[in-house]
Amino acid sequence: MTNRDAYEQFRHFQFLFDRVVNAYTEISELPRISALDFDPDAPRSRTLTHDAINFRCDVEAATTDALRDLPRLQQAWFELAFGEKVNGGVARAVITRCGRLYEVRGLCPNKYFHAFRRGGPVR
């Protein structure tokens, strides 16, 4: 693998990592309990759905599997997810390990939720 190929692969994993983490943090902030609003003019409130719960569980399982043997990297994952500064080598290791597994498990939010709505593979 050339340096250019390695760079392109890392950029792909970084893009995928960022998409998954952004979706995960957004879902983590959704309210768990909602009430019905009968006002048709009221803006639709976003709530935690079954799809979102499944996505969150799948991301947590993939992240745990990717970083199982290195608790230091698990802490770095949370730091990256919440926008904190992380050492470049550590960030690269987290992004590469997680990005590879996120891709294998199909956790890109666009693909994941599209397949989920269409009745994707049984897990």
Image (cartoon, helix red, strand yellow):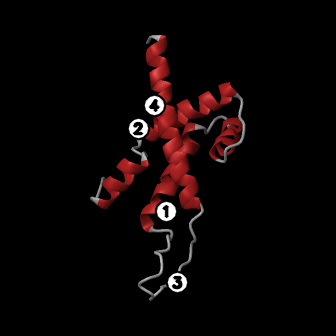
User: CB under 8 Å between callouts 2 and 3?
Assistant: no
Q: N-terminal of the two: label 3 or label 4?
A: 4
Which residue appears at 49% of the width and 70% of the height?
A: 46
Spatial CA span between label 2 and label 3: 37 Å
Q: N-terminal of the two: label 2 or label 1?
A: 1
Q: Is residue 58 above or below residue 33?
A: above
Residue 37 place in picture, x, y as percent:
48, 85
Q: Is the N terminus in the top left, top right, bottom left or bottom right quadrant? A: top left
The reply to whether residue 122 is in sight is no
Q: Looking at the image, which residue sits at the far front?
A: 41
Which residue appears at 44% of the width and 67% of the height?
A: 50
Residue 96 place in picture, x, y as percent:
54, 30
Residue 89 place in picture, x, y as percent:
66, 25
Which amino acid is tagged 3?
Ala
The reply to whether residue 34 is in sight is yes
Which residue appears at 58% of the width and 44% of the height?
A: 64
Which amino acid is tagged 4?
His
Instruction: Determine crowd level at label 2: few under 14, some 14-19, many 20+ residues with C-alpha closer than 10 A.
Output: few
Which SS class for mark 4? Answer: helix
Q: Is the C terminus in the top left, top right, bottom left or bottom right quadrant? A: bottom left
Which SS class for mark 2? Answer: helix
The residue singled out by tag 2 in the image is 104
The residue singled out by tag 1 in the image is 53
Spatial CA span between label 3 and label 1: 18 Å
User: CB under 8 Å between callouts 3 and 1?
Assistant: no
